Image: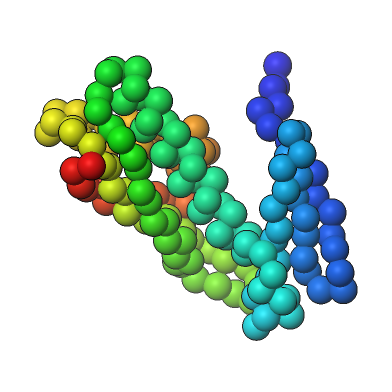
Amino acid sequence: MSEILRQIHLRTEGPAYQSVITNATGQELRADEPSALGGEDAGFLPFELLSAALASCTAATLMMFARRHGWELAEVVMDVRYVRTGEREGNAHHGRDLMARDIVLKGNISDEEMERLTAVAKRCPVAKVLEGASIEIFDQVRLEQA
């Protein structure tokens, strides 16, 4: 049996491409297209939202794992880059895209804990879904003391 994990509601707003996205608890965010594509740069771009989903899921997964093991992980800071690769024919895209995560772990983390957390980052639920799609996810993880 299938399970709905989360559901959002979207409504367009204004004459261009702006959208208001609402979750089940009523929180809202705005999405738009860049001005180069006729948008107004008034919200997150769709690929920024995809990158944000990966980043927030990764950070939460790392923090949960560290806390469950009693490790001193104080903060996760991350940059995510989405890179279109492969060949394009008109609007069609053929190839495997790349999402590169630059993950900084802040805290008192041992080398062994760092190694485990690096592996855990690849197992966050959003990363697993994206890896099953035609998107490759590349990680660079480094430690900064808190």
- The quarter of the picture where the C terminus appears is top left
Dividing the picture into quadrants, the one containing residue 59 is top left
Residue 139 visible to the viewer: no
Q: Position of residue 60 (x, y in %)?
A: 45, 34
Relative depth, front residue between 26 and 51 = 26
Q: Residue at x 37, y 51 (%)?
A: 78
Dividing the picture into quadrants, the one containing residue 116 is top left
Does 54 sit left or right of 90 as displayed? left
Taking the view exactly as shown, the residue that stands out farthest to the bottom is: 36
Q: Residue at x 86, y 69 (%)?
A: 14
**Figure check: 6 above or below 76:** above
**Figure check: 86 above or below 7:** below
Q: Residue at x 49, y 42 (%)?
A: 56
Does 42 sit left or right of 122 as displayed? right
Taking the view exactly as shown, the residue that stands out farthest to the left is: 111
Relative depth, front residue between 13 and 86 = 13
- The quarter of the picture where the N terminus appears is top right
Does 18 sit left or right of 127 as displayed? right
Q: Position of residue 136 (x, y in %)?
A: 41, 51
**Figure check: 102 above or below 146:** below
Residue 97 visible to the viewer: yes
Q: How is the model colour-coded?
A: rainbow
Q: Position of residue 112 (x, y in %)?
A: 14, 28
Q: Position of residue 52 (x, y in %)?
A: 52, 51
Q: Residue at x 77, y 55 (%)?
A: 20
